[in-house]
Amino acid sequence: METKPVQFKNLSREESYGFDRKTLDYIRNAAAHGLYEIRGMGAKRKLPNFDDLVFLGASMSRYPLEGYREKCLTKTVLGTRFAKKPIELDIPITIAGMSFGALSANVKEALGLAATEMGTSTTTGDGGMTPEERRSSRTLIYQCLPSRYGFNPDDVRKADAIEVVIGQGAKPGGGGMLLGQKVNPRVAKMRTLPEGVDQRSACRHPDWTGPDDLAIKIQELREITDWEKPIYVKVGATRTFNDVKLAVHAGADVVVVDGMQGGTAATQTCFIEHIGIPTLAAVRQAVNALEDLDMKGKVQLIVSGGIRTGADVAKALAMGADAVAIGQGVLVALGCNGETYFQNGAHHDAIADYNALGTAPGFCHHCHTGKCPVGVTTQDAILEQRLTPAVGAKHLKNYLKTLNMELTTIARACGKQNVHHLEPEDLVALTIEAAAMAGVPLAGTNWIPGRGF
Amino acid sequence: MERLTFDLATTPLRELNTFLHKDINDGKARHVTVLNPDGAHNIAVGLDAPVEVEIVGHAGYYAGGMNKAASITITGSAGTGVAENMMSGKVHVKGFASNGAGASSHGGLLVIDGDAGLRCGISLKGGDIVVGGSVGSFSAFMAQAGRMVICGDAGDALGDSLYEAVLYVKGSVKSLGADAQYEPMSEADIAAVASLLDQAGLDHDPKAFKRIASKRSLYHWNADANQEY
């Protein structure tokens, strides 16, 4: 019998699942350049996240608080384990570490102004502390990174806490990058680098190699600061259960866990999308590690990586975090990916500048180019003027205020007078994946995958 | 000059460091002797005054770490990260130094009379290091600025991924790291080596040293370079 190949009109246009247009584009790009793609922001792919959890509000079995009248505390204290001067914040929402270099001096100042008004902290980044940010931020966390760019004892003494950065959620196991177009004279001087080099930060600290060494390094920082300042340890989320335990053993007051949705100003795309675990999974492992060591409440946990809304904050806290840190959400509040920028009292269209980068508002991840059309992630003398500290600070303050209101609204609905009283029992999951990762039951069941029925 | 002695066999380290941070800043010149260090970590870290400290014996990790202005002498050997991130002043190790000696130092002078371990001068940011003996592998890794004088030999991958720091070696180099290259010694180089040797109190012929600096071929991403490193 004769067989003929079937020629369906539709199937002749069928896109391959494995070799879809995105993949074809990736291969062509690789073939043309011989260099991996470097970009900014965090993982773009669909991952289980806090949207896959919902709260069980109070009803018959629980008693809610009156949403607008009854007190709901948000005060947050970090670094109570060894430091003489713990960090006291009015809200459990902090600003994540982002470098001067990645961000303009104006942006760093805006972060400090808004954080100070809201009673929370900001964090330096790879590249050291600028006077603008120290002046504007009441509570400033000073990062000690593998590169040690601009790291110096005077700023250690000026800081309110020290954060030893082991890794970042966007790139656990990798160092930072700052492409040449952002290494302007001031950035170069602060980092002791030639102007315009494509800077690659070290991924390992220069003076210690493992958790036992880190314990001594932390002790050095405590000795230098006369045991006054809290020492945070930040890890990118991978083997989070073990890493958090080791950080606690090394003497951390606070552990910061950054999930794979966390952003970066410049990293290889293969790193951003393929290394690390989702924030949702990392929070559960981190909390389990603290509970396993009987250190819950003694060592505080800050969670970051794709936190966007007050609901996200509430869910992170309910799962056991003491605070969250936000990077990308903060940048969006300042205007990142917006269609316009506000300068000299008027909005100006930025779409042509996005187009020049080959992108559009809503899709932009071109932080690495330094040509941010809205003046957020740039060192360009003209572009950085598109974001003034006062205007940025106003937007950021509004954003933080909104998140805090959402957080307390949810906490009251769950019958809590203090946002830190939110608990895992307030949560259920909408997907089996999220239930397994977060360790809360699938909604409508008692089933937590991996823990039997 | 007022002379003070702290005996770490009987005095807690924290008391010594707190004294060196707080009570020393009254403008009086002081010489502090530290007895019985017995390899304790973090001795005389974070100093910020032109005081002289003599550690009589062996020090553990990070001795003289983040030093600013002080002159610190260790009569024995020093552990990992001696004088790490030094800003100014001087740290002198009369014995040997372990790994990461002078890591990310921004200024000042680190002198090691004996040998130094792995990664000596890693991430150097402007400080000067003079090693009387030899240095281990991966020394001056990613060193950004400053100078290193090595009177003995160097291990593997010396000066890997160097930026603008300059290295001078008298003995043999097992291998250079990526992007490091030998360059001719100029009169200025000979004068620099002579001056550093003089400050370190070491007697060598400055002309016998070789200069190593960056090829600068890793300064920019280059698609056609096929990532040779």
Image (cartoon, coloured by chain):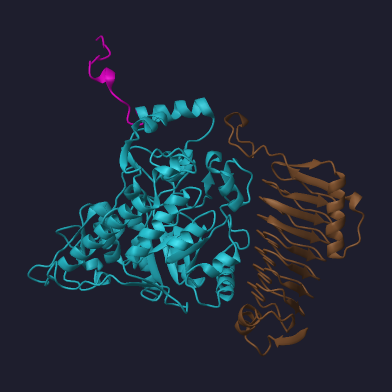
Chain colours: A cyan, B brown
- Outermost residue on the bottom side: it is B10
- Outermost residue on the front side: it is A344
Image point (78%, 70%), residue name: B93
Image point (89%, 53%), residue name: B206
Whether residue A19 appears in magenta in the rendering, the answer is: yes
Q: Residue A250, position in %: x, y?
A: 52, 70
Whether residue B175 appears in magenta in the rendering, the answer is: no
- Outermost residue on the left side: it is A60
Question: In the image, B3: left or right of A65?
Answer: right
Question: In the image, A238: left or right of B192?
Answer: left
**Quarter occupied by residue B44:** bottom right
Q: Residue B28, position in %: x, y?
A: 71, 81
**Magenta segment main secondary structure:** loop
Is residue B95 visible to the viewer in this orientation of the structure? Answer: yes
Is residue A285 visible to the viewer in this orientation of the structure? Answer: no
Question: In the image, B185: left or right of A65?
Answer: right
**Quarter occupied by residue A444:** bottom left
Q: Residue A324, position in %: x, y?
A: 35, 61
Q: Give the range drawn in magenta.
A: A1-20
Answer above or below: position of B33 versus B184. Answer: below
Q: Quadrant of the N terminus of chain A?
A: top left
Q: Quadrant of the C terminus of chain A?
A: bottom left
Answer above or below: position of B35 versus B132. Answer: below
Q: Residue A106, position in %: x, y?
A: 44, 50
